[in-house]
Image (cartoon, grey):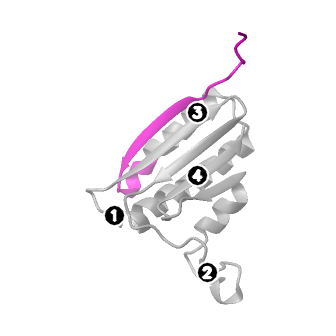
Amino acid sequence: MEQANVQTGELFTLQLPSNPESITQLEALIEEIADKYHVADDTFANMMTCLNEAAINAIIHGNKLDAAKKVIINADVAPKRVIWTVTDEGDGFDYNHLADPTAPENLESLTGRGVFIIKHLADQCIFNAKGNEIELHFKI
């Protein structure tokens, strides 16, 4: 019997402490993957922005800067796409009922734009039911 030509991806995993300074480890991983897979500059910039935002949200809002909690980041890289997941150990949130950052009453706010930005820069953005994990898809 002839076997199908199946290409499998390469997996990368990172465990970050719930400390904003740990973001440098994530940035290094994004750079490593972008270099290895020849990711275009605009896609690289979108990945860097989205993953920084998702990881900071996980550290601050999800894990509430609790040093005992980790943020788990996975990257599943295939020749034409990368799927990132960012998971925190927090209680999650209701991603369906976020304030609209473009509403006039929110324009002056210094926070509340992260998920809005992520949804516009990633090719696909999926939250788990609990709201403590985000999956981000990028074509490369």
Instruction: Say what amino acid the circle numbered 3 marks.
Output: Ile
Question: Residue 65, labelled with which disc?
Answer: 1
Q: Residue at x 49, y 34 (%)?
A: 12
- Residue 99's tag is 2
Q: Residue 60's quadrant in the figure?
A: bottom left
Picture coordinates of residue 86 (x, y %)?
A: 50, 51
Residue sitting at 71 percent across and 79 percent down?
102
Circle 4/circle 2 CB separation < 8 Å: no
Report helix, strand or loop for mark 1. Answer: loop
Residue under pointer 3: 33
Furthest residue in direction top, as rendered: 1
Q: Earlier in the sequence, mark 4 or mark 2?
A: 2
Name the mark on residue 91.
Answer: none
**Where the C terminus falls, by quadrant?**
top right
Q: How crowded is mark 2: few (under 14 residues within 10 Å), some or many (20 or more)?
A: few
Disc 4 residue crowd, few under 14, some 14–19, many 20+, Cα 10 Å: some
Gap between marks 1 and 3 measured at Cα: 27 Å
For residue 3: magenta?
A: yes
- First in sequence: mark 1 vs mark 3: 3
- Which mark lies nearer to you, 4 or 2? 4
Question: Dot 4 corresponds to which residue?
Answer: 135
Q: What residue type is labelled 2?
A: Ala
| Residue interval drawn in magenta | 1-23
Type of amino acid at the residue the image marks with label 4 = Glu
